[in-house]
Amino acid sequence: MTVVRIGEGALRGRHSDGVHAFRDIPYAHAERFGLPEVAVLTGERDAGEYGPTAPQGSTRIPGVDLEAIVGPGWVRGEEYLTANVWTPDPGASGLPVLVFVHGGSFTGGSGRTPGYDGSAFARDGVVLVTVNYRLGVIGFGSLPGVPENRGLHDQLAALRWVRDNIAAFGGDPDNVTVCGESAGALSVCDLLAVLPPGLVRRAVSESGGGSHLLTPAQAAVTTRAVAEALGVPATAEAFASVAEADLVGALAKVTAGQPNLAVDGLADPLMGLSPIGPVLDGDLFDRQPVDAVRAGAASGIDLLVGHNTDEMNLYLVGLGATIPEVTPELLALAVSRLHPEPAAVIEAYRTAGRGRTPGELLSAIGTDYMFGVPTARIADAHAPHTAGTWRYEFTWRSPAFDGRLGACHGIELPFVFDAVDRVDFGLLGITPTPETRTLATTVHQAWVRFAHDGDPGWPRYTPEHAVVQRIDAEWTLTTEADGKETAVWDGIR
């Protein structure tokens, strides 16, 4: 058992295999629709076990075991704005820190997810922190009279807690990297636009981008639908009187109905994967984050960004959409929510050889729209400025579903956390082999190096040399990562 002191309080953690772990540490507390306030620790608190999670529904994709990357679901409890910390030595000083922001479509996930165990990072000299933040209607529902983007305010509060307290765990508050995947990566790109100077030194976006903020009109579509499902007015007062479970259930019902957020001449920035998310509120955000980065926000923050080659396969394979049952009509309907000229988009991707069947084309188009193009845009926006920019594409293909998952959404996570042997990742589809173990070690070390000194081990991405590291069993560099077909997205948000 290990004890660290924070302010007037103390935490009792656990020590195993050279790693000290401290779990369920309150970093803030908040009223349901209020801004987070600093949590003050007094007395001695046992930090040996995980605590509750934010209220959430089930995150399931048929036929795919996602527990390793989305966690156990809703673990109920009152105080869930907490952090978990893994460190090699709380008595050390000056260790680099990596804060990981989980994904889950802004409606699910938690910092207690098995695949995000920070032991491998700690053994390699990095203090790893995971955090919970408010989700769904409670975290991101757009309601009159209350602050927007509450889940992002939680993340900012967690980063401030790290700055103020991580030295007690051996970490360097001046060498903090914030890293996220999926909704966590979108969050990281959002934070780039608003981070106060000195709060973080580096950032990593795994399958994110900075052009997805919902407009107030788009956010209102979901708010009205949730209110209708609940049978209450679309007000904060009415929503505050509803049980958490009912809010979760109403949002799940709305999500299943696939509300069309392509309003006011704008495409659906979340492509139907979630009806809720951060909002262009005119307060925290006065423009899309990519535009803020282009104008110089985060100019002093090193940035590592990337995506996976077949991101959308995760969502489509389990639903059978990459097999011939997907019709040309369904493909056209899906693309019409993303682009005013769906036929031109489909033809561009077909001509480029990005798919033979409607399902394959839908996966390629969705991957670029949601992940590939936003990743390129944020890299291009950041590259001209002072700090370094690095870009990757994860191309290793999972053999799961007879190889049809490919390099799908989330497939890089067991490699980043060097956890192919420690956690049962259903996405991998195989018993770990020497090849996958070697790849996991190599990928993990790239993230470790980036957290240490801002260099993952390949050339920088610059306006003059837009080099992308393709990550597979064999690593290759390319300056032609973005095909000509991606030009169809120019001017499309």
Image: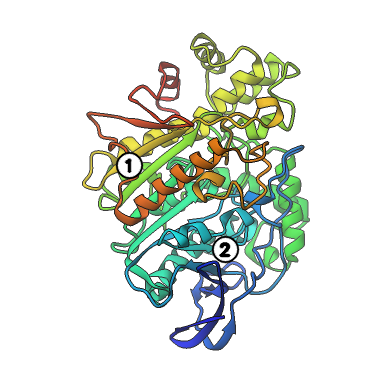
Q: Does 95 sit above or below residue 316?
A: below
- Mark 1 against mark 2, which lies toward the viewer? 1
Q: Is residue 446 visible?
A: yes
- Residue 283 falls left or right of residue 252: left
| Residue topped by disc 2 | 132
Q: Are marks 1 and 2 in contact (CB under 8 Å)?
A: no
Q: Position of residue 413 (x, y in %)?
A: 54, 45
Tag 1: Cα neighbours inside 10 Å, few (<14), some, or many (≥20)?
few
Nearer-the-camera pick, 268 or 161: 161
Q: Does 445 sit above or below residue 24?
A: above
Mark pair 1, 2: CA separation: 30 Å
Q: Does 360 sit above or below residue 84?
A: above
Residue appearing at x 34%, y 73% in the figure: 93
Badge 2 element: loop
Residue appearing at x 36%, y 56% in the figure: 194
Q: Does 155 sit above or below residue 407?
A: below
- Residue 188 falls left or right of residue 367: left
Residue appearing at x 36%, y 21% in the figure: 480
Q: Position of residue 176 (x, y in %)?
A: 36, 61
| Residue topped by disc 1 | 457
Nearer-the-camera pick, 144 or 258: 258
Q: Position of residue 162 (x, y in %)?
A: 42, 69
Q: Position of residue 267 (x, y in %)?
A: 53, 32
Residue type (three-letter) at the residue carrying disc 2: Asn
